[in-house]
Image (cartoon, coloured by chain):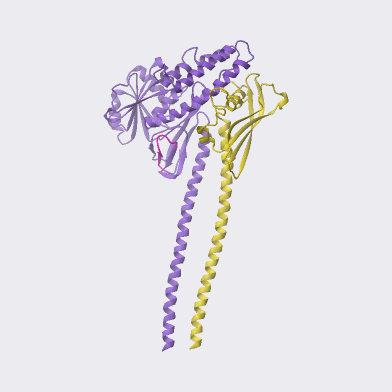
Amino acid sequence: MCIKMKKSQLKQTETISILFIFFILIFVVFFIYSKNKADNIQNEIREKELRRAVELSSKAHLLPEIQCSESQCIGCSGAMEMLKLDAVSNCSNSCSELIFDSVHYFQEFGMGSIKIEITYPNKTNLPDYVNHNWTIYDRKPLIYNQFIPHYIPVNIFNPISNDCYFGVMEVAVYS
Amino acid sequence: MLRSKKSAIEVQFNWIFVLIVGGVLLFFVFSVIRSQTETAQYEIDVTIRNYFDTILQRATQARGSLIDLHLRGSTLTSSDSCVDTFYINENRNLRIELSSAFSPKEMGSVSGTFFVWVVPWDLPFRIKNFVYITSPDIVYLLVYEDNDTEDYAVEINYSRNRLSLPRDDKITKIVLHNGSLQGELQKLNHLTTRVVFFKTNCNGVPMPNNANTAICLEIDSDKGGLDGWGKVKYLEPDNLNKETYFLGRPSLIGAIISEDITQFDCSMQKAYIKAEQLFNIYKERSSNLTISDPTPNCNNIHARAENRLEDMINCINNNDNYETIEECLYDATFSGAGSLSGINQESKLRSCVYVY
């Protein structure tokens, strides 16, 4: 009698322990899979932010607000016009100080900043009336995790002296 | 006896136990499969959306882009007249976002192909790009009434040198006289049709029978013809017609493509807001140039340009002396030597810094 009781108990325990180990294995596999998935998602988020920075810089570079008109900047292809940059970043009359500081541009650019700086010729060789850097858009959140800057070489045309300068546009995305 | 009862209990218990655990396992497996399928589907939709965003982003910034969109769905629906989002097969995850697009509200395409093209709107310098979306399954009937309006209809149908609707392999168009309209509509009864009347006066024009949608364009050569400004009437059943205005040929084409007056006006309002911002930039620029342009006798040119730009800003905000914003802007921008384009020509002749 005692032996038969022990056999049934042993069999039940064995079944339960097999199932227990099986579930542990499933959870371990699931945990590894989830971790891998989470890492992939982080990479994709990072890639999307980089892509957004590139898109933003492409948009900013082609804005009619700062681009040269078609027939104007001969010999300085795809350039931004210096006087327009002055007007956008330092509008002193009836328009707001930063023209780009409006809801319309926030919908286009979101949280980010766009700055342009002349790198060649250097500051000392530029005429006095020429600004050498401009901030044309700047919307910074109070708290952010990441700041991703993206740099693009640009031409800047001075229509007064018909000179073409070389510069860099910094487009930054906050996330 | 006690032993046999014990063994009977043991056998029954094992089967129940196995059934319950098996059921739980199967439920778990099927729920994982289902959630993973949904996630994978969502990932595919997001990937497709990113793909379209990348292509259209660049294309809508370049002048004169023409894109065939091959979609895996057969309908493209605009969410709202004033929102720039289009859903493929009404799937909220599968969407295309296009700023200031003119399009029918709902488009079907048997082949799954839709057509996007981009045209710059100049006033007289570039303000923004207008984006048009349509389907090759929609037939555009360009209807004229006399020789003058026939010229307009033919030019909008296709022109090698001027802006017009794209070629017939992209958009289906038929140019016809008013007298042939009803016959043609009956032949095309099974298709989606849009009738576009070219007239000098749109009063009393009824909505044609058998047409899905219709508009009437009032073109006047004294107002600049197709490149100037004029009235657009969206025809409705029961003569509840609605009127608005176009300014410039891209705007006229936008009126032809737009579903209704709400969408057209919404896109034009956004364009006018952008125009006002650009006018401010150019005005500030001209103001600086009145002082800094070193070429003699250019101050006057920049001062006049500044005044003209001020007039253009006032057109949008408060067009007191004119019937419409469009008339005011056309006058300030294009009409005559004192207009902005005239002043810019003068600046070129005198070797001043260009006004724009």
- Percent of width and height locating residue A22: 53, 68
- Say if B350 sits above or below B114 in the image: above
- Percent of width and height locating residue B148: 36, 17
Left or right: A50, with B173 as reference point: right
- Percent of width and height locating residue A115: 62, 32
- Chain B, which colour? purple
- In the foreground, B347 or B109: B347
The answer to whether residue B166 is visible is: no
Corner quadrant of residue B22: bottom left
Left or right: A71, with B331 as reference point: right
- Percent of width and height locating residue B334: 47, 16
- Chain A, which colour? yellow
Q: Residue furthest right?
A: A124
- In the foreground, B285 or B67: B285
Which residue lies at the image location 43% right of the left edge and 41% below the top edge? B87
Corner quadrant of residue A152: top right
- Say if A133 sits above or below A23 in the image: above
Q: Quadrant of the C terminus of chain B?
A: top right
Which residue lies at the image location 50% right of the left edge and 19% below the top edge? B310
Q: Look at the image and give the residue range highlighted in magenta.
A: B73-84
- Say if A170 sits above or below B37 in the image: above
Is B27 part of what is drawn in magenta? no
The answer to whether residue B48 is visible is: yes
- Say if B15 sits above or below A165 in the image: below
Q: Quadrant of the N terminus of chain B?
A: bottom left
- In the foreground, B16 or B53: B16
Which residue lies at the image location 33% right of the left edge and 31% below the top edge? B213
Q: Residue furthest top?
A: B297
Q: Main secondary structure of the magenta part?
A: loop
Left or right: A27, with B230 as reference point: right
Mark count: 0
